[in-house]
Amino acid sequence: MVLDPYRLPEATWPSQLDDKPVWMTAFRCSSENCHRLSIGWSVLNRVNQLSSAKQLLPQSDLQWEPLSIRRPLFPEVPPEIAETASEAHACLSIGAARGAVALARSVVEATAKAQGITAHGIVAKIETLRDDGVISTLTAETSHQIRRDGNSIAHGDIGNEPVSVDDAQAIIDFMDALLDDEVFQRPAKLQKLKERHNERKQSNSADTRPDGGAELEASAGGAEMR
């Protein structure tokens, strides 16, 4: 802790904490490779004195700001789809479940378009991906679940079926599997393996070609002439 704790004004407390003082302060990372500052805050029941807060805050169940935001990269995915998928992860990492699901829906539809699927509507696009063998039947069924959840949010039906962080995490996991295993990244990795295999094969063929055969023949001829 590098600063004395600060008691937030009551007007800034979260609504569910109306009767519980909120204290916060700055902490410095103990890692010798970091030393960066983060803000830690916690509810300290019935603590109104700085001296007590200074003692109790480091031992409390701290909440941290800024939050750790996760933005994974999708190197083999088209940039506009990769950026949207990364943003879906960022939403989830700060608890914005509805935003994560809505973006995952966009990723599913954009993935279909990137595969040249021109069918109208996301339902038809998913079915065409399945029929063309790009995705499995199970993947198609799960894609439809994402579509339904995303539609509810996009069309304003946000109170009908609350989206929990666990639900959103499952949908994001599926989105990752769609991009990694089914459509973009795994096929790209396999293609690279195939290309490297072909390159090694060609290199080995070049090394074993009888380039030295002419020299051998010349040597043999020289022996005959001798």
Image (cartoon, rainbow, N blue to C red):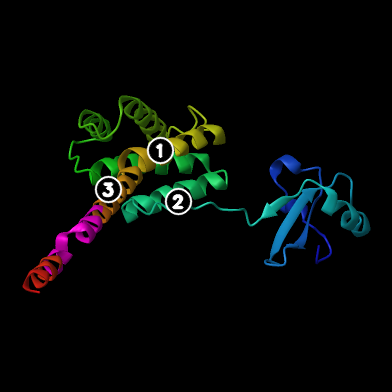
* Residue range (magenta): 201-215
Please rate how many residues cluster around mark 1, counting C-alpha atoms within 10 Å: few if below 14, some from 14 to 19, many from 20. some
In-front residue for pair 193/164? 193
State left or right for residue 202 relative to residue 35. Answer: left
In-front residue for pair 13/187? 187
Element under label 3?
A: helix
In the picture, the quarter occupied by the N terminus is bottom right
Q: Which mark is residue 87?
A: 2
Residue pointed to by mark 1: 177
Residue pointed to by mark 3: 194
In the picture, the quarter occupied by the C terminus is bottom left
Mark 2 to mark 3 CA distance (whole Å): 32 Å
The mark closer to the camera, 3 or 1, is: 3
The residue located at (17%, 66%) in the rendering is 212
Element under label 2?
A: helix
The residue located at (19%, 36%) in the rendering is 120
Looking at the rendered structure, the kind of residue marked 3 is Lys
